[in-house]
Image (cartoon, helix red, strand yellow):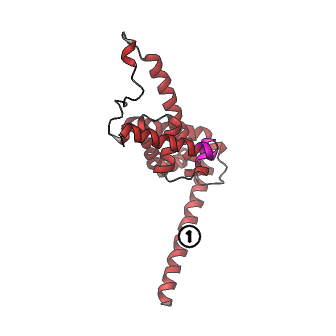
Amino acid sequence: MEGLAGAAFGVTLTHMRDDEDRRATEKRLVRDAQSGDLQAFERLYRENERRVFALCLRMSCDGALAEELTQEVFVRAWRKLGSFRGESAFSSWLYPLTVNVALSERRSRRRRDARILATDDPASLERSPGAPRPEAGFDLQKAMAALPPGARAVFVLHDVEGRTHDEIAAMLNLAPGTSKAQLFRARRLLREALGS
């Protein structure tokens, strides 16, 4: 039994050393990138790109748009790299940046679409208050895409990513109570859109 416990302790120490090595490497890469080393930033990009893309995809529900948003996140990260103080992991610093880029794109797309939408029959744009949204249907991705940006961000961060309301509040610069209200709203809208 002692041998087994010793082996488990050894594995834990090895895992802790690996984590420390990863953190030290990341700090060195960030420092080098902050000094203008593009290869260091490229390595940070390669190590974080899949995670950023996955979050962009969940928030945009569009693969091509998620790729564009991922690129935008790293362009902004490069520009703002000087503001990274190293108090957290680089990926933790990228997370709210990613959320903000996705939300910003969604807001600007809605403004753009509102300006572009034109019709000869304004009555065709009206729908009765209880009518289901045709674009939502029974597809969860479409229903999520139809959520207001704030509710959608909180839903993705809480129910998909597993973040707490306090973490979400810090990321999105809002009160934890507002995060809870947005989550309630998102769930209600999703239930309505999915007809359950």
- Work out which residue is located at the far top of the displayed protein and give it: 120
Q: Nearer the viewer, residue 147 or 127?
A: 127
The one of 144 and 59 positioned closer to us in this rendering: 144
Quadrant of the snapshot with the C terminus? top left
Residue on which disc 1 sits:
17
Residue 66 appears in the figure: no
Give the left or right position of residue 176, taking residue 196 as reference. Answer: right
Q: Callout 1: 10 Å neighbours few (<14), some, many (20+)? A: few
Q: Position of residue 92 (x, y in %)?
A: 57, 51
Residue visible at 55% across and 61% down in the picture: 22
Locate residue 1, reporting x and y percent. 47, 90
Examine the rendered structure and indicate whether residue 1 appears above or below residue 47. below
Amino acid under disc 1: Arg
Residue at 37% x, 28% y is: 131
Residue stretch rendered in magenta on the structure: 168-178
Give the side of residue 42 with respect to residue 28, left or right: left
Relative horizontal placement of residue 106, taking residue 196 as reference (left or right): right
- Observer-nearest residue: 54 or 181? 181
Residue 84 drawn at (x, y percent): 64, 47
Q: Is residue 157 above or below residue 8?
A: above
One can see residue 190 in this view: yes
Instruction: Tell me where residue 152 appears, x and y as whole percent.
Output: 48, 40
